[in-house]
């Protein structure tokens, strides 16, 4: 647990040793002395978690820290090292977990304050050249760190890239652009493409009455057919891809197939339970792995060929948080967004006996994962998962579980035939 630092070290001279602050005048440094958090931590305390998004920079004053990356790489930084003159893990989300190896003293400074004090034209160059030990060259940075950094930056610049798998986008767009399509028919077609569905939910907030909606049909109603057609057309020609590499081809296909299967199982379960929000269950299932699709979208444009291990590690480590950030930043309907985010945790438990929307999505995910024999992020033993207990699906050979797996596979094959997707 961090606590306030002793006052005797809170001086302008202390700040002068750090590279990004060396050229600031005394008045600016005094401003930082006053507003920064001067902290200390005990041995084994975590100063910053892997994936941390707090908008601040950490400077090491005294002691030793361990930087641990997502791929297992480690680096020890001592306050006497030249590298300690730079901030620790400047990228956001953080690509390192920073842990105290000894009692340490450090400063936490708001990046907003730094941006105010450092000339804007110099800030980008200064920060990019000092933000992290061993992160000074993009060519040397690991795949996961670059993916997360690019996604985070583009999200906050309102320029996030979210790609549709081209074979799906092509067939879906043809259906939506057909003349005399009514809203319900367009919505049915759109919900076969997770990326397009999410873009419709986002875009609909800026049309007519505005505000977030919980269904694709409502989104299309708010946008109107003309704007829906335009967005569909732009999604197809600007933001759909059919990767040439086998790794990404299989990744895009697999992500889309899981989306469709989880969506259909979630809807089926909701109807069996006579839940009013069966359509919302389907949509939550469709978008349950939107963080994974975002990572694939950026992997497609990566400057070098990536390995299967790199891609799997990045998805396992960061897809949950990226999905949360995306849904929050795009202001997706609260209960829908919350259900999707909560469903990323296998052990989620709302404390009531009656299953809710999140339980439905978790059960659908488990069913599909077992059906596909998917070993990425495997669920715990089924009897331990609260959602499955509430739905009486906590044994893999239960009648309902068996029925759901058959149903999921059949619905996927039907969808592929409808869209003309070949195996």
Image (tube, rainbow, N blue to C red):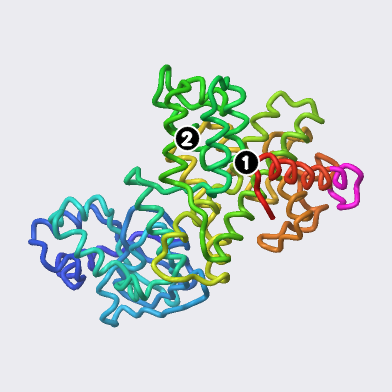
Where residue 206 appears, as percent x and y from the top left, is 39, 26
Q: Earlier in the sequence, mark 2 or mark 1?
A: 2
The magenta region covers: 394-403
Residue 401 highlighted magenta (yes or no): yes
Task: Give the farthest residue toward the bottom.
Answer: 81
Indicate the secondary structure of the residue bearing disc 1.
Answer: helix
Looking at the image, residue 181 lies above or below residue 402: above
Q: Residue at x 78, y 35 (%)?
A: 269
Where residue 77 appears, as percent x and y from the top left, is 36, 78
Which is more toward the observer, 230 or 122?
230
For label 2, the residue is 232
For label 1, the residue is 286
Q: Residue at x 32, y 46 (%)?
A: 157
Residue 247 highlighted magenta (yes or no): no
Which is more toward the observer, 393 or 200?
200
Indicate the secondary structure of the residue bearing disc 2.
Answer: helix
Looking at the image, residue 79 lies above or below residue 401: below
């Amino acid at each position: 647990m961090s606590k306030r630092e002793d006052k005797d070290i809170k001086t302008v001279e202390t700040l002068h040793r750090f590279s990004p602050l060396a050229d600031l005048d005394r008045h600016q440094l005094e401003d930082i002395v006053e507003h920064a958090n001067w902290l200390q931590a005990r041995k084994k305390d975590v100063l910053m978690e892997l994936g941390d998004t707090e908008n601040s920079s950490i400077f090491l004053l005294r002691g030793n820290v361990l930087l641990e990356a997502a791929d297992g790489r480690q680096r020890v930084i001592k306050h006497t090292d030249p590298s300690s003159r730079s901030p620790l893990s400047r990228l956001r989300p953080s690509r390192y977990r920073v842990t105290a190896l000894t009692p340490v003293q450090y400063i936490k400074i708001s990046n907003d304050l730094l941006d105010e004090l450092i000339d804007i034209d110099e800030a980008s160059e200064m920060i990019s050249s000092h933000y992290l030990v061993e992160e000074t060259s993009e060519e040397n940075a690991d795949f996961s760190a670059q993916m997360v950094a690019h996604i985070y930056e583009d999200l906050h610049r309102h320029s996030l890239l979210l790609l549709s798998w081209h074979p799906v986008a092509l067939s879906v767009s043809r259906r939506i652009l057909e003349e005399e399509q009514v809203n319900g028919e367009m919505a049915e077609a759109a919900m076969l493409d997770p990326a397009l569905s999410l873009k419709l939910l986002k875009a609909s907030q800026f049309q007519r009455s505005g505000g977030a909606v919980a269904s694709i049909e409502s989104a299309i109603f708010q946008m109107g057919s003309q704007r829906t057609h335009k967005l569909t057309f732009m999604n197809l020609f600007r933001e759909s891809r059919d990767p040439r590499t086998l790794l990404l081809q299989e990744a895009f296909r697999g992500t889309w197939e899981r989306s469709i299967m989880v969506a259909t199982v979630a809807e089926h379960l909701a109807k069996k339970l006579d839940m009013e929000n069966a359509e919302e269950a389907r949509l939550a299932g469709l978008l349950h792995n939107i963080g994974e699709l975002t990572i694939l979208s950026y992997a497609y444009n990566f400057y070098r060929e990536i390995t299967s291990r790199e891609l799997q590690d990045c998805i396992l480590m960061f897809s949950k948080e990226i999905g949360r950030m995306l849904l929050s930043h795009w202001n997706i309907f609260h209960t829908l967004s919350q259900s999707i985010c909560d469903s990323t945790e296998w052990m989620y438990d709302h404390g009531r006996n009656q299953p809710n929307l999140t339980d439905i999505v978790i059960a659908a995910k488990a069913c599909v994962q077992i059906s596909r024999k998917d070993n990425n992020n495997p669920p715990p033993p089924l009897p331990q998962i609260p959602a499955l207990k509430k739905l009486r699906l906590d044994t893999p050979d239960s009648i309902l579980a068996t029925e759901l797996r058959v149903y999921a596979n059949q619905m996927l094959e039907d969808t592929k035939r409808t869209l003309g997707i070949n195996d």
